[in-house]
Image (spheres, rainbow, N blue to C red):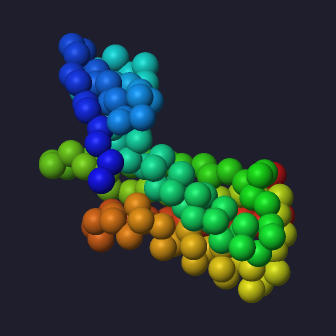
């Protein structure tokens, strides 16, 4: 089990300290009175999906002796417009210069769609996942 300590300071800022000593700062977004200098908690939520997808894709690529070194994910997060405030939609576009075979694409995309974060998302969160191979 991973342990993370999160400490609140004023201005809607938190500092999360991982058990390995790494630190991550979050800010509340400006629209709710935060400073907005760092990722908001919901920004991290959306970014964690893309990060998890790329990580699982890289593991699958390694098994096929492929490299995803030039691959990136572009993420857009939309918040709900009516209460309660929550993430309503996440769009992820994965772009790569890699041009895999249809079988390789299927394995890479399946890995992305079965990452732990993806599997943990609430079903009410709309997800748009797009893969663009041979691009950038």
Quadrant in the picture for residue 67: bottom right
Report the residue at 77% width, 84% height from top. 102
Report the residue at 60% width, 49% height from top. 74
Report the residue at 72% width, 73% height from top. 63
Can you see residue 24? no
Report the residue at 60% width, 58% height from top. 54
Q: Is residue 98 left or right of residue 22?
A: right
| Residue 116, percent from left and from top | 42, 65
- Above or below residue 41? Residue 67 is below
| Residue 106, percent from left and from top | 67, 82
Can you see residue 105? yes
Of the pair 106 and 5, the residue shown nearer to us: 5
Q: Which residue appears farthest toward the left when viewing the image? A: 84
Quadrant in the picture for residue 125: bottom left
Q: How many marks?
A: 0
Q: Is residue 82 left or right of residue 76?
A: left
- Above or below residue 48? Residue 112 is below
């Amino acid at each position: 089990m991973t342990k993370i300590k999160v400490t609140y300071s004023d201005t809607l800022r938190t500092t999360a300290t991982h058990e390995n000593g790494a630190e991550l700062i979050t800010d509340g977004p400006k629209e709710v009175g935060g400073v907005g200098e760092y990722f908001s908690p919901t920004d991290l939520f959306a970014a964690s999906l893309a990060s998890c997808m790329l990580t699982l894709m890289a593991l699958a690529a390694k098994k096929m002796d492929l490299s995803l070194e030039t691959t990136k994910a572009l993420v857009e997060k939309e918040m709900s417009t009516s209460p309660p405030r929550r993430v309503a939609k996440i769009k992820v576009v994965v772009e790569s210069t890699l041009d895999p075979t249809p079988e390789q694409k299927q394995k890479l995309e399946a890995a992305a769609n079965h990452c732990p974060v993806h599997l943990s998302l609430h079903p009410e969160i709309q997800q748009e996942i797009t893969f663009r191979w041979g691009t950038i």
